[in-house]
Image (cartoon, rainbow, N blue to C red):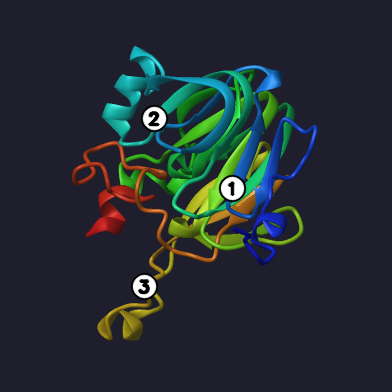
Amino acid sequence: MTIHGSLFQDFREKETQDPFALQNKKLLRIDMRYGPVQAKTGSMVAYQGDVRFQNKGSGGMGKFLKSAMTGEGVRMMECTGSGELFVADEAAEVQVMYLENDMVSVNGNNVLAFSSSIQWDIHRIQARGGMMTGGLYNVSLRGTGYVAVTTKGDPVALDVASSPTYADAQAVVLWTSGVSIDVRVDTGGLGSMIRGGTGELLQMAFGGQGYVLVQPAENVADGGHQNGGGNKGGAGGMLGEFLGG
């Protein structure tokens, strides 16, 4: 028996020496020779070799309590062993970056994997308008190593230093260190409010130096930039109950 066609040639595993490498836009290949990694719980789709998984939950009691109080956070598993590990998250696009003694602030729902050398925690976003929502929270990833996040569609990286920058809170994936954040209210005017509003009431305003990454989908609702005061069963959205209804 013979199988005809180019399927197994077109999609065969890509050979690379990089610790984190894209197999394709939606699948991340991790070379386990470089040491343990943290990956989103349930993100493993395949591996070759001897890879072991340990559920790390919310990352310790301190992070567990922060996650319970804020609604933000991410459940991680520790991956150790040898071989190649493939991870993905519901066919979302994967974006890879390398931090060198730096930090990014990420929507918890978009965290896919990172090197064990990267430290993570839940932090409060220092936004002047944050009091309107009861508090904004995000996941900080800090240190030196690889970080992989997911986006729904190809994102755009906006240089906030070049011009005043605003984004729908439910489309923001992450921003880099040096970026300042505020919350802007845009009612669209009285006439617009009478007609039901614009749907763009709360916007995130960015300044300072650095980049904000925005995806072409306004549905980063599960686990992102959450409200600190209850979030309707854990799905309160990036601005918590204020945006959730």
Q: Secondary structure at mark 1?
A: strand
* Among the two numbered marks 3 and 1 on one chain, the one whose residue lies closer to the N terminus: 1
Label 3, label 1: how many angstroms apart (C-alpha)? 33 Å
Q: Quadrant of the N terminus?
A: bottom right
Which residue was labeled with disc 1?
Answer: 27
What residue is at 61 percent from the left and 39 percent from the top?
148
Element on which disc 3 rests:
loop
Where's residue 209, x and y in %?
Answer: 73, 45
The spot of residue 151 in percent (x, y) is 54, 54
Q: Quadrant of residue 74?
A: top left
Say which quarter of the image contains residue 231.
top left
Residue closest to the eye, 179 or 65: 65
Mark 3 or 2, closer to the camera: 2
Label 3 to label 2: alpha-carbon separation: 31 Å
Residue 159 showing in the rendered view: no
Q: In front: 184, or 14?
A: 14
Q: State the mark number for residue 75.
A: 2
* Residue at 79% across, 37% down: 16
Instruction: Tell me if 204 is positioned left or right of 35 in this view.
Output: left
Q: Residues within 10 Å of mark 2 (few under 14, many from 20)?
A: some
- Quadrant housing the C terminus: bottom left
Tag 1: residue type? Leu
> Does residue 231 sit above or below 194 in this rendering?
above
Q: Which mark is residue 199?
A: 3
How busy is the neighbourhood of tag 3: few (under 14 within 10 Å), some, or many (20 plus)? Answer: few
Res. 231 in view: yes
Q: Nearer the viewer, mark 3 or mark 1?
A: 1
- x then y, percent, for residue 141: 58, 29
Q: Find numbered disc 2 in the image and state the secondary structure of the residue it sits on.
A: loop
Task: Please name the amino acid that badge 3 sits on.
Answer: Gly
Determine the residue located farthest toward the front in the rendered image.
Answer: 1
